[in-house]
Image: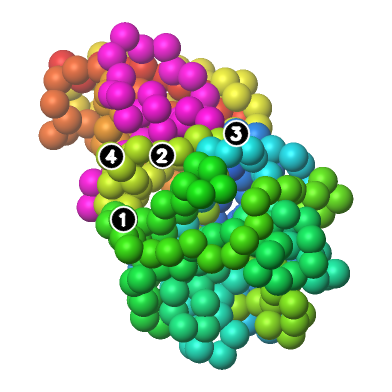
Amino acid sequence: MKKVLLSAFVVMVSITTLFSQNIMDSLIVYYPFNGNANDWGGNGFDGTVSGATLTTDKDGNPNNAYYFDGVNDYIDLPLNSALNPDFPFTFSAWIKTYDYSSTGFRIFGSNWREDHYYSGFMVLVSDLGELAMWVGNDEYIGSSSRRGKKSTTILNDSVWYHIVCIFNAMDDFTMYINCEEDLNNTYLGTANSYVSNSSYHPSLGRFDIGDLNEAYGWGVIDEVAIWNRALSPSEIGILCTSTLEVISGTKENTLKILNIFPNPTSDYTTVNFSNPSNDHHQIIISTIDGQLIQKYTDITGSKFSIDCNGFAKGMYFLNILNMATGENAIKKFIVN
């Protein structure tokens, strides 16, 4: 599977792909769930996990997605107005349901509340297997308090799906399932306004639909992202066919590196850290146009040697992250 590198910090290069420029534009939050519920979108909207457990993702990688038991598991997100964006905005995720016929699967609600009012926006799988997207008007639960769509496509349990929900306006909702736009669906509900309530925070894995015993869902969620804009069909195609690799730190460009030597190189180069410790580092190597070449994780010690045999001649970027401190650095090296 092709991999595309996303960087949450600015790399000043003369050549970059249109995709690598645009995909970060207006990104609010990104949860790759690589061992935790931290936000890798650069805004620090880290999730707080309650009950949900790390599990295997769609590619078979352990501890890279979250499993929800359908009883009381959820992940709360911070109370921040940015997570309740105005039109247009996009929600994207990978999901896998287990037995949606019992209560459905609550994927995301931007206002978690227990008073039976609809507000903010919601994404779920119904108890009939339909993907659904709604907005609420901050009124008591009922058809007059929401506006949304359900898919004509019926999902299957125990199967991974990539979903994209684009909220353009009250009468302009679009959903994609595995890269394909779901067509011939109809609007449901008669609400004529979208209202988010600033008193309530977002949640993954739950929201109130009138019965708190059915406010959760049994399944797996991964790679959640929200943009404050509508994604294009070409961007959606890349999202659902590529593995996105994001390197981001809370202390951008502060990681100190002694040197990268030799540079240029024809075979091997070595990264010498200035802060050798037991901290784990991650290194991602990319071309100047953003293509991922190699990824190394769980690096410890004062130095790390990189085998460049087989690399095409040219300039490359090392994106280096201290997984413990959030410090990162970007370094160039040349293969000749």
Cα–Cα gap, marks 3 and 2: 19 Å
| Snapshot quadrant of residue 216 | bottom right
Which residue shows up at 68% across the image and 82% down it?
A: 214
Residue contact at pointers 1 and 4, CB within 8 angstroms = no
Which three-letter amino acid code belongs to the residue tagged 1? Glu
Q: Earlier in the sequence, mark 1 or mark 3?
A: 3
Q: Is residue 63 visible?
A: no
Q: How is the image coloured?
A: rainbow
Cα–Cα gap, marks 2 and 4: 8 Å
Picture disc at residue 42: 3
Categorize mark 1 by other alpha carbons within 10 Å: few (<14), some (14-19), many (20+).
some
Image spot of residue 223 (x, y percent): 48, 54
The answer to whether residue 305 is left or right of residue 225 is: left
* Residue holding disc 1: 181
Q: Is residue 10 visible?
A: yes
- Residue mark closest to the camera, 1 vs 4: 1
Q: Earlier in the sequence, mark 1 or mark 4?
A: 1
| Local SS, label 1 | strand
Cα–Cα gap, marks 1 and 2: 13 Å
* Residue holding disc 2: 231
Q: Quadrant of the C terminus?
A: top left
- Residue mark closest to the camera, 3 vs 2: 2
Between residues 321 and 155, which one lies in front from this camera angle?
155
Q: Earlier in the sequence, mark 3 or mark 4?
A: 3
| Snapshot quadrant of residue 142 | bottom right
Cα–Cα gap, marks 1 and 3: 29 Å
Image spot of residue 16 (x, y percent): 30, 19
Say if 202 sits above or below 317 in the image: below
Q: Earlier in the sequence, mark 3 or mark 2?
A: 3
Q: Which residues are magenta?
A: 1-28
* Residue holding disc 4: 234
